[in-house]
Amino acid sequence: MKQKIRFEKNIKDNILTVLESAEVDPGVMLALHEEDYDLDVINQACKEGLKAFLAVFRRRSFFPTRDLAEKLFENAIVFFADPESDKMVIDYNDVDSLPGEEDFTLEDDDVELDALLDEDGDTKEDEIKEIDSEDDTPRFTPEDTSEHEN
């Protein structure tokens, strides 16, 4: 799954906002989650190393995988080193974390829906009539005393 993680500094309020988006369809990104952090605390954690960063950054509601968290940490160091930058976007594709795996794309020619729908390849109207030839009308007699039929 392709993800975008955006860091936004709000220096006036001393807040770092982290926004997570994911690709739900090819080319369509959907906002998933927003988390606020104390800017000074995150900045100090970046200076102390990955373990300190993860201790502050990971929360019950936002818990990125190890690969993604390491990538966020590496980019956060650069982001906080530049006092002029106030936004940063990190692209992440979890397929990259699986060695030897390739992107799977389904071509339109790969699936023939007509072949899937027609088991024998030939559906005739007579076959449909034959299936629906039985009379499904419920029959009740006066001796029938069940509650749902009266």
Image (tube, grey):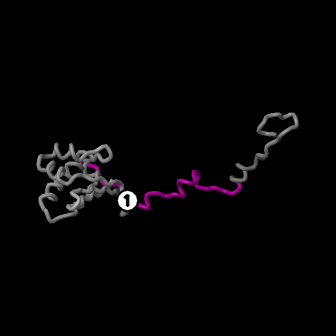
93 relative to 140, above or below: below
What secondary structure is the stretch in magenta mostly built from?
Answer: loop
Give the camera-side residue of 110 and 21. Answer: 21
Instruction: Classify the position of the C terminus by image quarter.
Output: top right
Q: Which residues are drawn in magenta?
A: 99-126
Residue ranking furthest to the front: 13
* Amino acid marked by disc 1: Leu
Q: Which residue sits at x=30%, y=53%?
A: 35
Q: Is residue 118 magenta?
A: yes
Write down the residue under mark 1: 30
Query: Where residue 5 sits in the image (x, y, percent)?
Result: 27, 57
Question: Residue at left 40%, top 60%?
Answer: 107
Element type where label 1 sits in the image: strand
Counting other residues with Cα less than 10 Å from the Cα at mark 1, is it few (<14), some (14-19), or many (20 or more)?
Answer: some
Please say whether residue 111 is one of the residues in the magenta stretch. Answer: yes
In the displayed structure, does residue 145 sit left or right of residue 47?
right
Instruction: From the viewer's side, name the closer residue of 30 and 2.
Output: 30
